Image: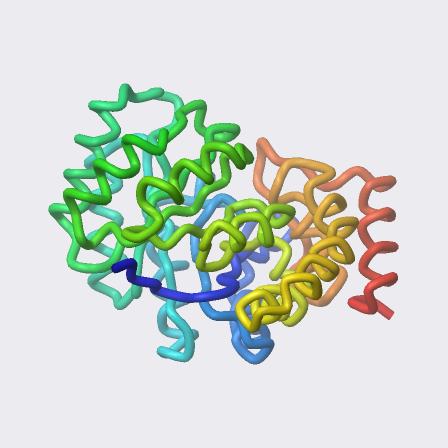
Amino acid sequence: MKQEIFRGIATALATPMELDGAIDYEAYGRLIDWQIDAGVAGLVACGTTGESATMTEAEHKEVIRFTVERAAGRVPVIAGTGSNCTAKAVAMTQYACSVGADACLLVTPYYNKATQAGLIAHYTAIADASDKPLILYNVPSRTGCNLPAETTLRIAADFPNIIGIKEASGNIGQIVEVAALAGDRLAIYSGNDDHIVPVLSMGGSGCISVLSNVVPREAQALCRRFFAGDVAGAAALQCKLLPLVNALFSEVNPIPVNAALAAMGFGKGGVRLPLTPMEESRRAALLAEMKRLGVLA
């Protein structure tokens, strides 16, 4: 039987930053509190949206520790601890577990483009070193490395602490295949905000969401409607939120979500190179969509 570390929406937290790229922990703490008060089912720290790729090791560890302490057990905290270096992923996963993370999110090795045998060996090393639940993360558009359904099944079958997968391939056919082969063993989470209802319809457990940084109540309501049997209502809300989803991905994530959060009072909207501030025309369109939904006055 599959194990769910959360059911519904876990927010892939952005990391609010000053304009010079310094982490704004005051704003980050307020964001965590607001997310929990809004009813999200979990928080993901140091994922793609959190700009973990440009954090130093010390910053990465501190953001994980801070998130765990600020959440204080109110919701599960999933720490992004994946790397293209297996030894680094093992060490970061062990650290996250030691400071109280409830689970870890493990992106496929990027740049190296491992073989399927390499992927299995990579995840074997991490699973052997961890005492907490682990969630695989497949996002080939970012990593250049796809995690096929057959490999996912083999990994899941061998390691009971690998309990889920964040599927952000955008390939619905592959997600259906994962559900067919491993859906009774793995919790499947959408990694794309425009695919929440389609993934739920295949027995998915929820979404690790960028959208919920901005509209956490609405994102969680979408899942709540679906789980209550109101599929039409969930689909209608998915469609209503689609223009905001599109605006949040009109530039490379997490540029737009940081701009959105800055407009909401969470940080200054700073991002770290090679990311750059959002183009003004797209920022204006994003803010207009937020106003349409009542997020901004």
Q: How is the image coloured?
A: rainbow
Estimate the x, y position of residue 247 in percent, counting from the top left: 76, 45
Residue 264 sits in which quadrant? bottom right
Q: Quadrant of the C terminus?
A: bottom right
- Identified at 58% across, 65% down, the residue is 226
Q: Is residue 156 visible?
A: yes
Is residue 59 at least partly visible in the picture?
A: no
Q: Is residue 285 left or right of residue 262?
A: right
Left or right of residue 133, residue 240 in this image: right
Q: Quick one: quadrant of the N terminus?
A: bottom left
Residue toward you, 128 or 254: 128
Q: Position of residue 266 (x, y in %)?
A: 65, 65
The residue positioned 68% from the left and 59% from the top of the image is: 261
Residue 29 is situated, as x and y percent measured from the top left of the image, at: 52, 71
- Residue that protrudes farthest toward the left in the picture: 128
Question: Is residue 133 found left or right of 279 in the rendered image?
Answer: left
Q: Position of residue 267 (x, y in %)?
A: 64, 61
